[in-house]
Amino acid sequence: MKIEFLGTGTSVGVPQMRCNCHTCTSTDPRDKRLRASAIIYLDDGRNVLVDCGPDFRTQLLRTGCPDLSLALLTHTHYDHVGGIDDLRPYAHTAPDEHFPLYCRRDVADDLRARVPYCFLEHPYPGVPTFDIHIVNPDEPFSIGDGVMVTPLPVMHYKLPILGYRIGGLAYITDCKTMPDSTLELIRGVDTLVINALREEEHMSHMNLQQALDVIKEVAPRRAYLTHMSHDMGRQAEAEQLLPPGVYFAYDGLVVEDIPQ
């Protein structure tokens, strides 16, 4: 199994509009961060999209438009679901071609309100259509062929959201606090992806030290930080702050050799 990072930025991306800071003016391609998303490539040939933000079309064109089998959605904020309409090439009107979305009930309700034309009994030709699977935060679920997904409940300030674990990979974004029960679900995982917005404290996201504290507690073989803002600084400089085995992810990075 492997993961490809489609985007590793926060809600406004990096560079940030109307900003001429040290990070936003960097020429290092690793400092060009689209909104956070990823593709997990399963060993059986299926590809799982994690979140579908407003940069989805650009991200997929850049990565070669691989086949997508389903999507796992973490929460309902625009930077994580704003590209849903661009799933048109993967989601068709035939009943057996609706694109599977796995998400909490509040996310499903929000999508039905945002893009109601995708859920009509007789949809307009060409619109994307979806087969929504409601995820119970406390119940692992199968995505077929024996592949189990474990929901990872975390808090995004006061909003309950989900990360996901598949085999040796755990993907968590937009987390501010994590219950002990979720820590136990990821303890000793092979590869941990977790958000780290910046060095300074933030109301609804972990900062760098908080993410590093979780990584130390979980003790994965390796960890990758995602959902960074321009305040984290340039990658070439900021990565000097990281302990061994912890890395800043960047757009286009592919991490392989993850046990499924």
Image (cartoon, rainbow, N blue to C red):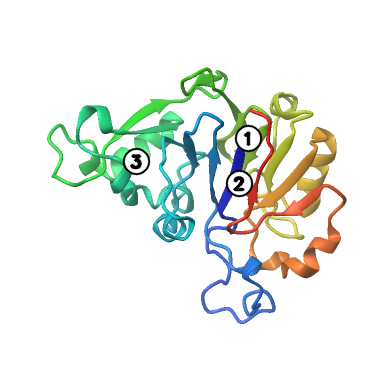
Residue 57 in the figure: left or right of residue 181 = left
Residue 60 in the figure: left or right of residue 150 = left
Q: Depth check: 18 or 62 in front?
A: 62
In whole angstroms, how far apart are the C-alphas of marks 1 and 3?
A: 21 Å
Name the amino acid, label 3: Leu
Circle 2 crowding by C-alpha within 10 Å: few under 14, some 14–19, many from 20 = many
Q: In this picture, is 99 found above or below 22?
A: above
In whole angstroms, how far apart are the C-alphas of marks 2 and 1?
A: 9 Å
Q: Pointer 1: what residue?
A: 154
- The reply to whether dot 2 and dot 1 touch (C-beta < 8 Å) is yes
Secondary element at image label 1: strand
Mark identifier at residue 254: none
Quarter location, residue 170: top right
From this viewpoint, is residue 204 visible? no
The structure residue drawn at horizontal position 51% and vertical position 29%, both measured from the top left corner, is 44
From this viewpoint, is residue 93 visible? yes
In whole angstroms, how far apart are the C-alphas of marks 2 and 3?
A: 19 Å
| Location of the N terminus (image quadrant) | top right
Q: Position of residue 196 (x, y in %)?
A: 70, 52
| Location of the C terminus (image quadrant) | top right
The structure residue drawn at horizontal position 42% and vertical position 29%, both measured from the top left corner, is 105
Quarter location, residue 157: top right
Secondary element at image label 2: loop
Mark identifier at residue 111: 3
Circle 3 crowding by C-alpha within 10 Å: few under 14, some 14–19, many from 20 = some
Q: Position of residue 200 (x, y in %)?
A: 75, 60
Name the amino acid, label 2: Asp
Q: Pointer 2: what residue?
A: 174
Name the amino acid, label 1: Val
The structure residue drawn at horizontal position 38% and vertical position 52%, both measured from the top left corner, is 83
